[in-house]
Amino acid sequence: MHKLFDLDHPFFRPLWRRLIIIAVCLGWGVFEFVMGNPFWGTLFAGLGLYCIWGFLFDHRPRTESDSKTE
């Protein structure tokens, strides 16, 4: 299945990287809401929630054998 964002990419294997990306998205969403931009605030908050789901609850990083079969 083709995805818009490959959340299982090896770059995202370390937990600290996933947490920083989530924090930046949610933080930017809060910033946009505070600055009076509800469209961008909703967009970035939604992206942050998507990343929470994809990085923490549904995260299955690829293994060496998975990448050889593609």
Image (spheres, helix red, strand yellow):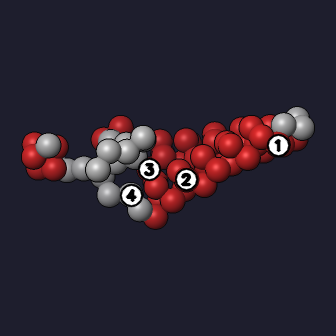
> Which one is in front in this view, the residue at disc 3 or the one at disc 4?
4
Residue picked out by circle 3: 15
**Residue 13 appears at what percent x and percent y?**
35, 46
Residue in view at x 73 percent, y 47 percent: 42
Whichever of callouts 2 and 3 sits on the residue coming sooner in the sequence is 3
The C terminus lies in quadrant: top left
**Foreground pick, 66 / 64:** 66
Tag 1: residue type?
A: Pro
Residue in view at x 16 percent, y 50 percent: 66
Residue picked out by circle 1: 38
24 is higher (above) or lower (below) than 55: above
SS label for mark 4: loop
Q: Left or right of 41: which side holds 2?
A: left
> Which one is in front in this view, the residue at disc 1 or the one at disc 4?
1
Tag 2: residue type?
A: Tyr
For residue 44, which quarter of the picture? Answer: top right
Q: Left or right of 42: which side holds 33?
A: right
SS label for mark 2: helix
